[in-house]
């Protein structure tokens, strides 16, 4: 044991790790690599967040319409 105090990982490091794992799971290969990936000869992967947000909005709208139909049907039954 060296007697040194171990510093905890920074919040920024944890955020970078979370982003890296998210892109690994949900990322798609980019048609045009970013400057960093191009300069370092890396395969560029980007998370298509706009697609996920559009899908979430579509699901929310469908849920709202289903709730409205359910309320109408309950009114008709009573």
Image: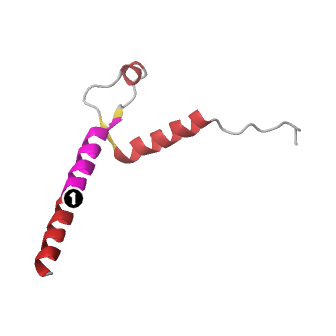
Quarter of the image holding residue 74?
Answer: bottom left
Q: Nearer the viewer, residue 70 or 41?
A: 70
Residue 48 locus on image (x, y percent): 30, 39
Q: Residue at image x 30%, y 36%?
A: 29
Q: Residue at image x 43%, y 22%?
A: 40
Give left or right: position of 20 versus 31.
Answer: right
Residue 32 locus on image (x, y percent): 27, 25
Principal secondary structure, stretch drawn in magenta: helix
In the image, residue 1 above or below residue 38: below
Q: Residue at image x 34%, y 35%?
A: 46
Q: Is residue 48 visible?
A: no
**Of all residues shown, which one is farthest toward the bottom?**
78
Q: Which residue is mark 1?
A: 64
Q: Is residue 53 visible?
A: yes
Q: Secondary structure at mark 1?
A: helix
Q: Nearer the viewer, residue 27 or 75?
A: 75
Q: Give the extent of the magenta segment.
A: 46-64
Where does the C terminus fall, quadrant-wise? bottom left
Q: Nearer the viewer, residue 8 or 37?
A: 8
Give the tally of numbered discs: 1
């Amino acid at each position: 044991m060296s007697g040194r105090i171990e510093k905890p990982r920074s919040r920024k490091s944890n955020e970078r790790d979370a982003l890296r794992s998210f892109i690994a799971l949900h990322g798609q290969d980019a048609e045009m690599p970013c400057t960093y990936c191009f300069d370092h000869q890396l395969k560029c992967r980007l998370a298509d967040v706009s697609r996920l947000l559009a899908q979430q909005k579509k699901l929310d709208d469908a849920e709202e319409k289903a709730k409205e139909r359910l309320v109408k049907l309950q009114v008709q039954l009573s």
